[in-house]
């Protein structure tokens, strides 16, 4: 499964640069955006030699947690750290349709409502053990066992027969997962109540696309898995590289998995190392790293660096504003709304959306690398994205009118609630790159212009791990927040916005939302035209109700040493949205 990602921006800047100056369509900005859009997705293909050490940069202002398990981590950073080893079960074509070219094959039987997954012979863990049927089944146990505290459990998985009963402690095994050749076979048959149209795509959330080494983990209690050495320090992978040395939070040294099923990797070693954003620009220009992702603030400084190939892609992701309107009920495994929540007011949410000058901010601070997205279904999903939905264009007059009509009257500088009580809104945002602070401050200024007293939670930007601890645990001091999602390659929004999704951090629940999400993923939606219609209806509903305000996306740009070949971001040349590292090598 392409891993759910939590996006974060990285770094901080002083208050001296807070003011947004003229943000018109300058020729420089237009040219920069155009040049980025023309960058290729792959490095030039050249003959590669055997051997060499590749230095891979991970830009972050916080240590990585180092949870080497798709079932137990939802962090984009952990996913990036694990990429040289953490291959998943399926490869895809460039439209994210599952192919038979990856470690496993897939077969759907709509008559019997079954999915058959068979791992290929010779796909071995880095200790030489064949990946087995039990290794395919075990992730479902990890996710569904409450002791593991996995955030991956969701209503979609309850479509598997027996999984809910296992989750609730009413069964000791998952009856709907069959291993016809036994634990040591290579096939599992998953029995569903009904098949879903998104099951042909990777990242579909109905069946799991990763495996875990049961023989290696079976003696660890579920409640200790996430902290175990087998997960944190000495993980096993069946991808091209194995973790030879982990310096927690700072670096990982990867060496070839000699049992890798596709063949011997070109490289002898990959050293992944954390680098602070404020020193990354110089590191790229001085060629300290062979591969380094570029955050928007760096592009102007590094774009003319010699002996570097730049590759770019528009990722399946977006940033958004979320409004806290309830809590997660762990006992019932669902979100529960609070009708008296401060942000449970459509007019207030709408006004906040229309007051955000996203286009101006992105053009000014990111040179067009970031760009506004109007809906919660990005354009990369093709016709599922409603290109006619304008979203929340910047309109202060409209924002003011909405608040006036809804009874949020001004008393002095600030507006009060319709009941006359004072209104103060606490806003949480992560620390980030050198533009994060001025961007956040600019949005605060726009909200202040319409009379909303919005203040940063804690008075400043919040460190990544602390931010998500507060958001995930429904900290009552936070009214709204700015975060982001890296999306699966199947477009269903069920996993992020449903009543039963723990990742629905806003905690909103409505009958209409439930209905539309069911229709999007119903058997009837195997009819493409019908499914497109329901996607458009859901986007309209989310815009009309403003439960979440989509903000922007950004090109991902990677600086790659010109002596490197085989690096690609094309979906058909990737696995789990990561490069196929066994192909990467130094030019002869």
Image (cartoon, grey):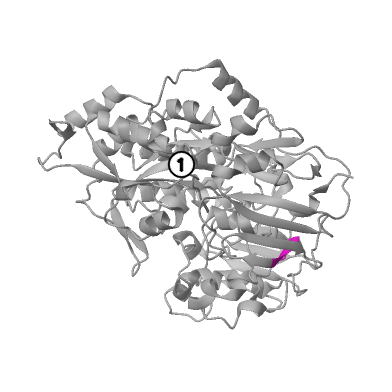
Q: Residue at x 29, y 25 (%)?
A: 396
| Residue 577 image offset from top left, x and y in percent | 64, 49
Q: Is residue 330 left or right of residue 11?
A: left
Q: Quadrant of the C terminus?
A: top right
In magenta stretch: residue 241: yes
| Residue 261 image offset from top left, x and y in percent | 80, 63
From the viewer's side, name the closer residue of 334 and 569.
569
| Residue 144 image offset from top left, x and y in percent | 49, 70
Q: Disc 1 on helix, strand or loop?
A: strand
Q: Is residue 515 visible?
A: yes
In magenta stretch: residue 551: no
Task: Name which quarter of the figure residue 345 lies in.
Answer: top left
Q: Residue at x 81, y 42 (%)?
A: 563
**Which residue sits furthest top?**
27
Q: Is residue 436 left or right of residue 142?
A: left
Q: Is residue 388 left or right of residue 99?
A: left
Residue at the spot of label 1: 319
Q: Residue at x 69, y 49 (%)?
A: 92
Above-or-below relation of 5 to 404 = below
Above-or-below relation of 348 to 327 = above
Q: Quadrant of the N terminus?
A: bottom right
Mark 1: give few (<14), some (14-19) or many (20+) Cα within 10 Å. many
Q: Is residue 484 left or right of residue 126?
A: left
Q: Is residue 98 visible?
A: no
**Which residue sits furthest left?**
420
| Residue 337 image offset from top left, x and y in percent | 27, 54
Magenta-highlighted residues: 238-244
Above-or-below relation of 502 to 14 = below
């Amino acid at each position: 499964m392409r891993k759910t990602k939590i996006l974060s921006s990285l770094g901080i800047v002083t208050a001296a640069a807070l003011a947004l100056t003229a943000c018109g369509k300058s020729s420089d900005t237009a040219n920069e955006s155009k040049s980025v859009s023309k960058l290729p997705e792959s490095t030039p293909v050249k003959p590669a030699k055997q051997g060499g050490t590749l230095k891979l940069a991970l830009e972050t202002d916080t240590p990585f947690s180092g949870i080497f398990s798709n079932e137990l981590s939802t962090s984009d950073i952990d996913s990036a750290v694990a990429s040289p080893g953490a291959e998943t079960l399926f490869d895809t074509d460039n439209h994210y349709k599952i192919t038979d070219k990856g470690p496993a094959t897939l077969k759907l039987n709509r008559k019997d409502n079954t999915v058959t997954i068979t791992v290929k012979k010779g796909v071995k863990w880095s200790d030489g053990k064949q990946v087995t049927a039990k290794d395919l089944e075990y992730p479902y146990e990890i996710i569904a066992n409450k002791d593991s505290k996995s955030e991956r459990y969701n209503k979609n998985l309850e479509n598997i027969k027996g999984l809910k009963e296992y989750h609730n402690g009413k069964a000791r095994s998952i009856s709907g997962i069959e291993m016809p050749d036994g634990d040591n076979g290579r096939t599992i048959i998953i029995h569903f109540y009904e098949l879903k149209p998104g099951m042909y795509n990777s990242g579909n959330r109905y069946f799991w696309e990763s495996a875990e080494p049961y023989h290696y983990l079976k003696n660890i209690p579920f409640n200790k898995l996430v902290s175990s050495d087998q997960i944190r320090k000495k993980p096993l992978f069946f991808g091209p590289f194995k973790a030879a040395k982990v310096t927690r939070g700072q670096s990982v040294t990867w060496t070839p998995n000699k049992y890798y099923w596709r063949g011997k990797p070109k490289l002898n070693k990959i050293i992944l190392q954390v680098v602070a954003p404020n020193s990354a620009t110089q590191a790229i220009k001085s060629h300290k790293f062979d591969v380094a992702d570029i955050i928007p603030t760096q592009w102007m400084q590094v774009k003319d660096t010699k002996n570097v190939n730049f590759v770019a892609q528009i990722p399946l992701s977006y940033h958004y504003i979320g409004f806290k309107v309830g809590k997660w009920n762990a006992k019932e495994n669902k979100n529960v709304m609070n009708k008296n929540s401060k942000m449970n007011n459509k007019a207030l949410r709408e006004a906040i959306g229309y007051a955000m000058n996203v286009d101006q901010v992105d053009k000014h601070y990111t040179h067009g690398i970031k760009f506004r997205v109007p809906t919660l279904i990005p354009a990369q999903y093709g016709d599922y994205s409603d290109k006619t939905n304008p979203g929340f264009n910047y309109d202060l007059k409209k924002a003011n009118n909405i608040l006036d009509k809804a009874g949020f009257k001004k008393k002095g500088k600030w507006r009060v609630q319709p009941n006359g009580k004072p209104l103060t809104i606490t806003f949480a945002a992560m620390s980030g790159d050198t533009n994060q602070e001025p961007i956040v401050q600019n949005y605060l200024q726009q909200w202040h212009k319409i009379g909303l007293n919005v203040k940063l939670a804690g008075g400043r930007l919040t460190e990544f791990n602390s931010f998500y601890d507060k958001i995930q645990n429904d900290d009552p001091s936070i009214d709204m927040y700015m975060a982001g999602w890296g999306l699966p390659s199947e477009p269903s929004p069920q996993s992020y916005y449903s009543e039963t999704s723990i990742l629905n951090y806003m905690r909103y629940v409505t009958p209409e939302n439930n209905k539309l999400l069911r229709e999007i993923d119903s058997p009837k939606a195997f009819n493409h035209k019908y499914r497109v219609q329901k996607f458009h209806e859901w986007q309209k509903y989310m815009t009309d109700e403003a439960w979440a305000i989509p903000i922007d996306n950004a090109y991902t740009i990677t600086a790659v040493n010109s002596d490197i070949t085989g690096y690609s971001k094309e979906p058909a040349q990737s696995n789990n949205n990561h490069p196929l590292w066994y192909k990467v090598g130094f030019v002869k």
